[in-house]
Image (cartoon, rainbow, N blue to C red):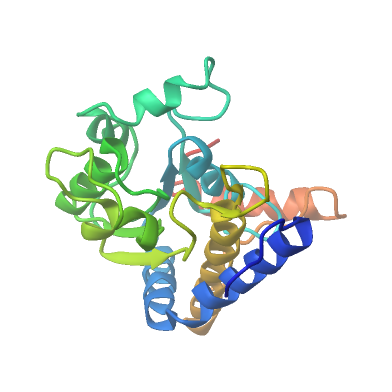
Amino acid sequence: MNWADNMNGTDYIKIVNETIDRAWNTQRETLDRAADAIAEAVIAKRNVFVFGCSHAGILAEEVFYRTGGLAVINPIFYPGMMLNTRPITNTSKTERIPGLGKEILDGTAAGEGDVLIIHSVSGRNTVPVEMALYAKEKGLTVICITNLKYSSSVTSRHGSGKRLFEVGDIVIDNMGEVGDAAVTVEGLLERIGPTSTAVGAAIINGVVIDAVNRIIKAGIVPPVFMSANLDGGDEHNARIFEEYKNNIFYM
């Protein structure tokens, strides 16, 4: 869709909604494969991990230890890569360090048969590409969430010359703009209004919901958290923590 100059917040909401709709409905086979991989891991009592650098790491925060979420999704948080880093500019440097992706994954319990979700919008930086390649060597299924239009327009910073979409087993496109920001305002050179977080959150929650449906069809009650602020929530969640204690690594 062609958008006029001097766009505003209403235009941004329209863009986000249309992007979510396009991303969800034009890559059904890929999203189904992602849901299958997560469901199969949970059914087999394997592990699920999610990783992203800087703002991409927001998706890791989005899907772990929360109401209505799968309890066995484990975030990978690394000091110097998250948004509480100071100075924040260090995050841009850290995600380009060779060898660090392997080191970070070795610091987790990730192993053969597990699933790793990596979110990287540009898909060009060393750490996410290296982590994806190493995870595949270790026998994990790697699900990537990235921006194909953006990533295809830039070169890789990894020694292999590969970008994330070129190394993942399952590649989900967030269908954003090059540079992520989507709104043009007259009198401003730069675009504003990034879409990757909103679209990515919708995609990853949708995939998790589809995975839960598959787990139920397999005759298993999925480990989904209740709100701790509902009556009985603490007791419900305590049972999940006990049953899945070997698959939860953020406690």
Image quadrant holding the N terminus, namely bottom right
Viewer-side residue, 48 vs 172: 172
Rendered location of residue 2, percent (x, y): 58, 72
Looking at the image, residue 189 lies above or below residue 166: above
Taking depth in this image into account, of 168 and 249 the one nearest to the observer is: 168
In this view, the residue in front, 177 or 95, is 177
- Rendering coords of residue 164 (x, y %): 28, 52
Q: Is residue 33 above or below residue 184?
A: below
Q: Is residue 15 visible?
A: yes
Residue 128 vertical position relative to residue 80 in the rendered view, above or below:
below
Residue at x 30% of width, y 39% of height: 125
- Residue at x 71%, y 58% (from the top left corner): 7
The percent position of residue 64, horizontal first and vertical second, equals: 58, 48
| Left or right of residue 103, residue 199 in this image | right
Residue farthest right in this picture: 231
Quadrant of the image containing the C terminus: top right
Q: Is residue 79 visible?
A: no
* Residue 132 x/y as whole percent: 26, 49
Count of number-bearing discs? 0
Front residue of this view, candidates 74 and 57: 57
Residue lying at the far top of the rendered structure: 87
Q: Residue at x 64, y 64 (%)?
A: 16
Left or right of 215 on screen, residue 30 = left
